[in-house]
Image (cartoon, helix red, strand yellow):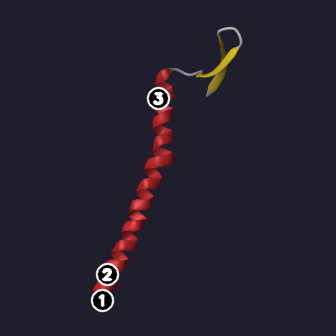
Amino acid sequence: MFELQTYNVNGLTCAPKHQPILHFGYQIYMTSVLLLIPLCIMIVLYGSVIHALRVDMKTD
């Protein structure tokens, strides 16, 4: 995904070797996989726990 490129005389830097639109798409993909999907899973699971606790409190 990245390649080493030289700059100035003796410097190295990492630069994407794909087109900018592909790099942007990859960033969107990684953001959704690493942040949005786990966030949705945690919201659903914590919501079910809160719902179960609320139902249990009403029955007591």
How far apart are the alpha carbons under marks 2 and 1? 6 Å
Is 45 placed left or right of 16 in the picture? left
Picture quadrant of residue 5: top right
From the top left corner, tell me how far across and down residue 15 is, in percent. Answer: 59, 21
Q: Is residue 8 above or below residue 18?
A: above
Q: Is residue 6 above or below residue 57?
A: above
The quadrant of the rendering that contains the N terminus is: top right
From the top left corner, tell me how far across and down residue 29 is, in percent. Answer: 48, 39
Q: Is residue 10 above or below residue 53?
A: above
Q: Is residue 24 above or below residue 38?
A: above
Q: Residue at x 31, y 78 (%)?
A: 54
The residue singled out by tag 3 in the image is: 24
- Residue extending farthest right: 10
Answer yes or no: do the residues labelled 2 and 1 have beta carbons within 8 Å?
A: yes
Report the amino acid beneath label 3.
Phe
Report the amino acid beneath label 2.
Val
Q: Nearer the viewer, residue 53 or 19?
A: 53
Q: Residue at x 47, y 31 (%)?
A: 25
The quadrant of the rendering that contains the C terminus is: bottom left
Tell me the crowding category of disc 1: few under 14, some 14 to 19, or many 20 or more residues within 10 angstroms, Cα based: few
Picture quadrant of residue 3: top right
Report the amino acid beneath label 1.
Thr
Q: Which mark is residue 59?
A: 1
From the top left corner, tell me how far across and down residue 38 is, in percent. Answer: 47, 54
Q: In the structure shown, which secondary structural element does the residue marked by tag 3 occupy?
A: helix
The residue singled out by tag 2 in the image is: 55
- Residue extending farthest left: 58
Of the residues under marks 3 and 2, which one precedes in the sequence? 3
From the top left corner, tell me how far across and down residue 44 is, in percent. Answer: 39, 63
